Image (spheres, rainbow, N blue to C red):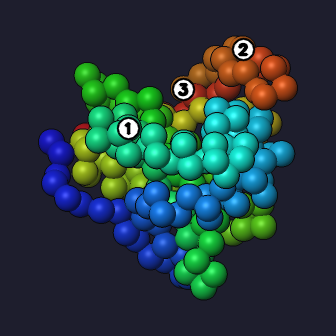
Amino acid sequence: MLKKNLKMNQTFNTYLVSDFDIQQREAFFKLIDENRPRLEDYFAGLASQTKTLEDTIRFVESIEQKRLDKTYFPFAVTDIATNAIIGWVDVKNTDWRIPKAEVGYFIDQQYEGKGIISRAFSYVVEYVVAHYGFKKLLCRANGKNMGSIQVALKNGFELEGTVRRDYRTTNNELVDLNYYGKVFG
């Protein structure tokens, strides 16, 4: 049951969690470019599609059709004081037969450890469950990525298992991924 014309717009402390606006493409590129070394292993697809500003503009332009198709929902976490995008939460790999989806997230390295992405993640989860009616959400995390694991656990997601050799990094390494899930309704 989809609700019409509802936009994500949640403010906490000095941060805003909102639907990603394609006009933010340069700020988005800056976030990725400044965090590229750490994103390449955990967000290999996104990192490879946004190597240059021109690549990022093409990626951002493709987002609009994916939103219309209801297959991809990106959200930006913005520092209100600087207007910089400092974090990203996206809902992807939707399966409307269940309905379920995967949630991905990351935050700029200098904002890590402050609980910002955990709170943003919580708002996005609440929003997409209420707005789109997802019955299950999942997160995938490399077992070495303790920050990502803590975000999932803090938000009530439970370890469902480890899938061996499930993800290829930009260095072409196959790694195991832990799957964390949460059911709703």
Q: Nearer the viewer, mark 2 or mark 1?
A: 1
Q: From the image, tell me which residue sits under label 3.
A: 160
Q: Nearer the viewer, mark 3 or mark 1?
A: 1
- Neighbor class of circle 1 (other Cα within 10 Å; few <14, some 14-19, many 20+) is some
Which sits earlier in the primary sequence, circle 3 or circle 1? 1
Mark 2 lies on a secondary structure that is strand
Mark pair 3, 1: CA separation: 28 Å
For residue 116, above or below residue 81 = above
Mark pair 2, 3: CA separation: 16 Å
On residue 66, the disc is 1
Is the C terminus in the top left, top right, bottom left or bottom right quadrant? top left
- Out of 79 and 144, give the one closest to the viewer: 79
Mark 1 lies on a secondary structure that is helix
Mark 3 lies on a secondary structure that is strand
Q: Is residue 15 visible?
A: yes
* Left or right position of 139 against 54: left
Where residue 89 sits: x, y (%)?
A: 52, 51
* Left or right position of 19 against 5: right
The amino acid type of the residue labelled 3 equals Glu
For residue 150, above or below residue 96 = below
Q: From the image, tell me which residue sits under label 2.
A: 165
* Left or right position of 59 against 37: left
Determine the image quadrant of residue 79.
bottom right
The amino acid type of the residue labelled 1 equals Lys
Which sits earlier in the primary sequence, circle 2 or circle 3? 3
Where residue 100 sits: x, y (%)?
A: 35, 31
Question: Which residue ends up furthest to the top in the rendered image?
Answer: 165
Where residue 118 sits: x, y (%)?
A: 57, 59
For residue 14, above or below residue 92 = below
